[in-house]
Amino acid sequence: MELNFNRLNALTADTTEDTHSKILTEGGKRLQNEANNTRDINQRVTEIYKEYQENINISSQLQNEITKGIQAGEQIEFLLLKAIKCISLMTGNNLFYEMNRDNIKMLKCVGTFISKIEE
């Protein structure tokens, strides 16, 4: 008596093919998700780097303006606001500038100076 494994082999072949298809589909989806995540991260990093470069350029301009302002005898409050803005840009801490600008504004009426710096 011989055993016939044809039905069992056919069942295994169909299951294996379906399983491979599912694995490939799931693997492809996973890889696509990883690629999308990587792309999103790269876009965020690029945006952050651009902002960082802009801050460096603006802080360099402010440093030059501060030096020239000191030499020209500009008012100290105006130079102080520029220095605070420069520090804020270099550290990425906008709250530092906003808080100190408001404090200086309360201590001394320098509203015209503040509007010049924010241009």
Image (spheres, helix red, strand yellow):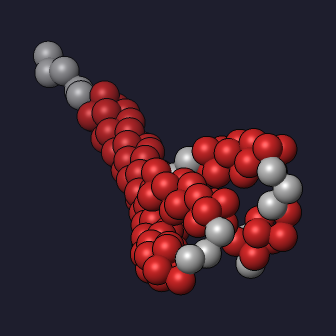
Q: Nearer the viewer, residue 51 or 78?
A: 78
- Measured from the top left, where is residue 51 in percent x and y? 52, 68
Name, please, the residue furthest toward the front. Answer: 73
Quarter of the rendering containing residue 26:
top left
Name, please, the residue furthest toward the top. Answer: 1
In the rendered image, which quarter contains the N terminus? top left
Residue 1 against residue 97 in the figure, above or below: above
Q: Is residue 10 visible?
A: no
Residue 31 against residue 3 in the figure, above or below: below
- Measured from the top left, where is residue 106 in percent x and y? 83, 44
Residue at 75%, 76% in the rendered image: 116
Q: How many marks?
A: 0
Residue at 23%, 27% in the rendered image: 4
Residue at 44%, 76% in the rendered image: 67
- Measured from the top left, where is residue 20 in percent x and y? 34, 45
Q: Nearer the viewer, residue 6 or 33?
A: 33
- Measured from the top left, where is residue 112 in percent x and y? 84, 70
Residue at 70%, 71% in the rendered image: 117
- Residue 13 falls left or right of residue 92: left
Quarter of the rendering containing residue 28:
bottom left
Q: Nearer the viewer, residue 39 or 33?
A: 39
In the rendered image, which quarter contains the C terminus? bottom right
Q: Nearer the viewer, residue 70 or 115?
A: 70
